[in-house]
Image (cartoon, helix red, strand yellow):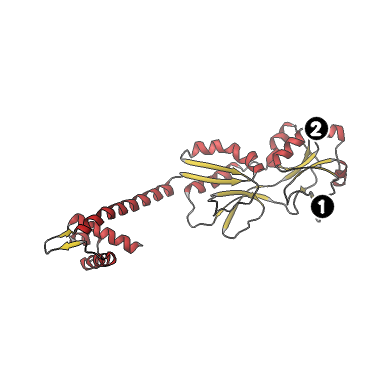
Amino acid sequence: MMSSLNRLLYFNSVVETGSISATSRIFDVQPSSISRQLAVLEQELGVRLLNKTTRNTGLTEAGLKYYEYSQRIVSEFDEAKRVVNDLQEAPKGKLNISMTVGFGESVILPLMPKFISLYPNIDIELELTERVVDLVEENIDVAIRSGRLPDSSMIARQLALNNFLLCASPHYLTINGTPDCPEALKDHQCIRYNYARWKDWFLMAEERTKLSLNKAISVNSVNGQKQLVLNDAGLALIPLWAIKNELADGSLIQVMPDYTFSPYEELSATYAIYLKREMLSPKTRVFLDFLVENIVDVEK
């Protein structure tokens, strides 16, 4: 590909300078090499492009037509290089982000106005979904997900621990009492997150114990859990990042704070996942750095 482009560059220069020797000086290449590349070009096309005399070099009719197109090709190539270099120099262009609904609504979306004000030349496309996305096929720059890194061709950057807390509204606890041990949960209405791998509750001690929940409501979003528990529907196991404000203002109360619970057999975290690349685009790099810098306090 580069040899073909070089031939076009040499051809254009010979046309514009009228001289192979002048072109050799411009490109710092021997005149014989220039002549050889022009001969290969004519051989590939099967037509003579240049009329050479001892004094100058002129175009044939076919050469004139070819030169018109050759100019455009070289110009487009130069423009392509300029655009790509500009993208590498400054954060700009479309940034496609896919994120889980709960973390997205609770943590990421409130940060977006600040990010946009810092990087106004980045166009952002957000998708909130619980499905596992294919970063390559769907042209996703960053996916925000909980769990382990599924593919070695990707890199995961931890954003926050999924520090799950058992909580309830003050009114629910006043009416139904406050459970003081994990076994007592079977007598309470429990609000579970209806996600395939997070629908059960575990006591995280030396041995993981799956808790028995007799009365349960299932809902398919973290914010759905939060709305139910805020409206006195029962107890819920929710990440701290989703209920930090409600705990601070007293609208929710942590229950059994001395125990560690999880809806999964292992403690987990939320990550920003992106493809392993030699050169990360500026728009992706600044977004990742922004997330790490601005999510530092969601666990505190």
Q: Position of residue 296 (x, y in %)?
A: 62, 43
Q: Position of residue 72 (x, y in %)?
A: 30, 51
Q: Position of residue 18 (x, y in %)?
A: 17, 57
For label 2, the residue is 170
Q: Nearer the viewer, residue 175 or 198?
A: 198
**10 Å crowding of disc 2: few (<14), some (14-19), many (20+):** some
Q: Nearer the viewer, residue 123 or 4?
A: 4
Considering only vertical position in the picture, is 42 above or below 270? below
Any part of residue 252 in sight: no
Give the residue drawn at x 21%, y 60%: 23
Name the secondary structure under disc 2: helix
Q: Position of residue 194 (x, y in %)?
A: 74, 46
Residue that protrudes farthest toward the left in the picture: 55
Amino acid at pointer 2: Pro
For label 1, the residue is 210
Left or right: 192 in relation to 128: right
Q: CA distance from mark 1 to mark 2?
A: 26 Å
Q: Nearer the viewer, residue 120 or 6?
A: 6
Name the secondary structure under disc 1: strand
Amino acid at pointer 1: Lys
Disc assigned to residue 146: none
Using the rendered view, name the quadrant where residue 249 is placed.
Answer: top right
